[in-house]
Image: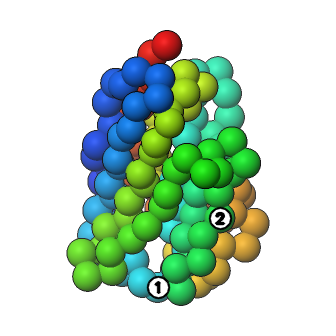
Amino acid sequence: QVQLAESGGGSVQTGGSLGLSCTASGYTSDSNCMGWFRQAPGKEREGVATIDRDGGTWYADSVKGRFTISKDNAYNTLYLMMNSLKPEDTAMYYCAARGRGAYCYRPMRTSAYSYWGKGTQVTVSS
């Protein structure tokens, strides 16, 4: 049974930094596309960043240059380093993994991801 567990969320002021982690069990991070999504109250879940089997990355325009996605295959862990945080980054952040597909074709398509974590809250105050 695949389980994804996020950690590292919290509260920070504008301009601050936070690092998120997602530990996968029953799943190997070096096989398929994985990513981070977020959902703010009253809004749809949106893709933030993805990483494919070979380490290729994709970022939403809103986070380019500020967020960095990475993974450690030895520990089946996915990371998201968030710098220069803004109040509009406030959301529940979810880790996601595809059941098949080494590459992140259509990275923002939530239906392409078979496994989801329960989320971790990130709050950025002005």
Say which residue appears at 42% left-offset and 84% top-offset: 30
Nearer-N-terminus badge (1/2)? 1
Tell me the distance, in whole angstroms, between the alpha carbons under discs 1 and 2: 17 Å
* Image position, residue 54 (x, y; %): 53, 86
Is residue 57 visible in the rendered image? The answer is yes
Q: Secondary structure at mark 1?
A: loop
Numbered mark located on residue 79 in the image? none
Callout 1–callout 2 Cβ contact below 8 Å = no
- Relative placement, left or right, of 121 versus 32 is left
Q: Quadrant of residue 58?
A: bottom right
* Image position, residue 63 (x, y; %): 62, 45
Kind of residue indicated by mark 2: Trp
Residue in front for this viewpoint, 2 or 85: 85
Q: Is residue 84 above or below residue 116?
A: above
Q: Which residue is mark 1?
A: 31
Q: Which residue is mark 2?
A: 58
Q: Is residue 49 above or below residue 75?
A: above
Q: Quadrant of residue 51?
A: bottom right
Q: Residues within 10 Å of mark 1 (few under 14, many from 20)?
A: some
- Relative placement, left or right, of 38 versus 62 is left
Q: Residues within 10 Å of mark 2 (few under 14, many from 20)?
A: many
Q: Secondary structure at mark 2?
A: strand
How does the figure colour the protein chain or chains? rainbow
Kind of residue indicated by mark 1: Ser
Which of label 1 and label 2 is nearer to you? 2
* Image position, residue 55 (x, y; %): 52, 79
Is residue 90 visible in the rendered image? The answer is no
Say which residue appears at 40% left-offset and 21% top-offset: 13
Q: Where the N terminus falls, by quadrant?
A: bottom left
Q: Is residue 116 above or below residue 104?
A: above
Say which residue appears at 46% left-offset and 42% top-offset: 83
